[in-house]
Each structure stands twice: as C-alpha cells, then as structure tokens.
Amino acid sequence: MSDLLLDINLQYSPDDYFDGEWQVANRVLNQNDPFSPLAQADEFVLAPGKLETRATATSPGQTGYWQVMRDEMLNRPYLNFELPNEATRALVTRLRRSADGLHSQLNLYFASGMELQLNRAN
C-alpha cells in the first residue's frame, strides 16, 4: 500500500468506514484457537449486518453477522462478530485511510488476545 494513510479519530469515525472487503495483512494468535473460523480467515467481507469470512482451500469460509458497538464512556468502537461456530468481539485499536478513501488499514484486538491487521483497497 503506497498511499499515505491518515489516522482516523475512532471516537468520531462513521460506522460505514468498516464496510468492505478486507484482506488479512498480519495476524497474532496469542491464546486464540488457531483452527477457529476467524483465525483461519484470509479475508473479511463486512456488509451492513452481514459478515463473510474467506479462507484458504483447506478451510472453508463462513457467513454470519457483525455490528459496531461503542462503549458509553469513550465512544470507542468494538466490532461484534457472530459466526455459526464462533462469537466474539474486537476492539478497533487503529483505523487509517487515504485522503481519497480508496485505501484503508484496520487493526483489531480480540477478547481472546488475537490481533489482526486488515487492509482494504477499493
């Protein structure tokens, strides 16, 4: 990703900034089950209310639901994920976008300790 990315203030970021097709650029599993659907996913497709994970040929993708939740005190965004075999939430720790909005980077920290860095290019 060669475009300059700017940090977005997460307290005021619109929820639709999370929509789109995201590719996993980096993953740290920590205590997460390495065979869980979210840990195996190579891509996340986030459409309003609908989640689709895509994985390698050896591990099928799954379809489920997601939503943005915000804590009451600081208005920090969390993403809730619900798949047939897994339900969890992740704190959005960083969101970066290019000035034209065509490139984005999203960092998520899951309750299990898993960390994902996702990239999107429209």
Image (cartoon, rainbow, N blue to C red):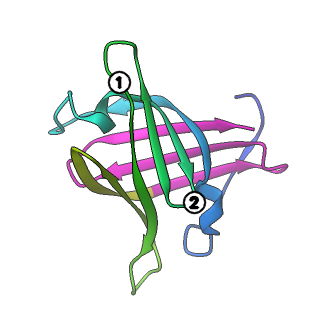
103 relative to 78, above or below: above
> Which of pointers 1 and 2 lies earlier in the amino acid sequence?
2
Classify residue 78 as left or right of residue 111. right
Name the dominant secondary structure of the magenta segment: strand
Classify residue 18 as left or right of residue 41. right
Residue at 20% across, 28% down: 34
Res. 16 visible in picture: yes
Q: Which region shows up in magenta?
A: 93-122
Which residue is disc 2 drawn over?
A: 48
Q: What is the secondary structure assignment of the residue under circle 2?
A: loop
| Residue 50 coordinates in the image, percent (x, y) | 49, 53
55 relative to 48, above or below: above
Task: Tell me which amino acid carries mark 1.
Answer: Pro
Res. 77 visible in picture: no
Q: Do the CB atoms of the residues marked 1 and 2 lie less than 8 Å apart? A: no
| Residue 85 coordinates in the image, percent (x, y) | 21, 44
What quarter of the picture does the N terminus occupy?
A: top right
Residue at 14% across, 39% down: 31
Q: Which mark is residue 44?
A: none
Count numbered badges in the picture: 2
Residue at 32% across, 28% down: 40
Which residue is disc 1 drawn over?
A: 60
Q: What is the secondary structure assignment of the residue under circle 1?
A: loop
Task: Tell me which amino acid carries mark 2.
Answer: Pro
The residue furthest right is: 100
Classify residue 63 as left or right of residue 32. right
76 relative to 33, above or below: below
What quarter of the picture does the C terminus occupy?
A: top right
Quarter occupied by residue 16:
bottom right
Classify residue 30 as left or right of residue 119. left
Magenta run includes residue 14: no
The residue furthest top is: 57
